[in-house]
Amino acid sequence: MSQINDEVLAANKDYAAEFGNRGKLPMPPGRRFAILTCMDARLDPAKFAGLSEGDAHVIRNAGGRASDDAIRSLVISHKLLGTHEWFVIHHTDCGMETFSNEIMADLLSSSLETATVDETGWHDTGKGPGSTEGRYINWMTIADNKKSVIEDVQRIKHHPLVPDDIPVHGYLYDCKTGKLHEVTGV
């Protein structure tokens, strides 16, 4: 076992000891909305959106992008669990702004080890083998935060499995202030 694993299990033991009535929460989210946001560890959707357990669905991926899998989750959230409003929340200083599809594919072709970044860009420090499979994935990188929010909101709104009457809001979370800023033009 690793130290991190031990820490997670110890924290879970404490959490489970205080779990109380949470085991009786219903499956559908109580506040009937979902958030699609980034996996960045600096974002805490429960805190910035005032959530308690059982309130909302939170879907997270790299960049908070409206990938096929994220849309799949939103459709399930609505169709089977009754959410009626969705939020797409990207953020400032996102790691997805620091590379392109080509850079990611090149890094993966060298090795599968963790890369490093400095003022000159990304560098592969691993020793092969790598894989060319990274060339076949759209990594959904971000060149412009506001534009990416608009693109994702529009992709969701125009998806054939998304009803026209679901409001889809677009926001940009400011990592320096904790504030949500509405993105206009969605």
Image (spheres, rainbow, N blue to C red):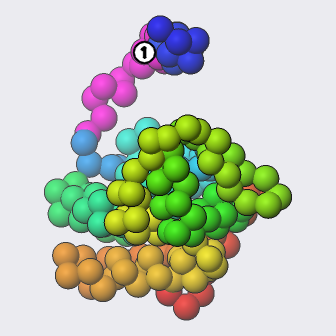
Q: Which residue is mark 1?
A: 16
Quarter of the image where one finds residue 179: bottom right
- In the figure, 44 relative to 155: above or below? above
Q: Residue furthest bottom?
A: 185
Q: Residue furthest front?
A: 128
- In the figure, 132 relative to 158: above or below? above
In this rendering, position of residue 72 left or right of residue 93: left
Q: Is residue 178 magenta?
A: no
- Residue for point 50% across, 68% down: 101
Coordinates of residue 70 in the picture (x, y in percent): 34, 61
Which class describes the residues within 10 Å of circle 1: few (<14), some (14-19), or many (20+)?
Answer: few
Say which of 142 and 36 sits in front.
142
Overall secondary structure of the magenta section? helix
Magenta span: 12-26
- Residue for point 67% across, 52% down: 123
Coordinates of residue 26 in the picture (x, y in percent): 26, 39
Res 64 seen here: no
- Residue for point 82% across, 58% down: 119
Q: SS at mark 1?
A: helix
Amino acid, disc 1: Ala
Res 66 seen here: yes
- Residue for point 21% across, 59% down: 76
In this rendering, position of residue 117 left or right of residue 26: right
Coordinates of residue 95 in the picture (x, y in percent): 64, 58
- In the figure, 143 relative to 109: above or below? below
In this rendering, position of residue 68 left or right of residue 109: left
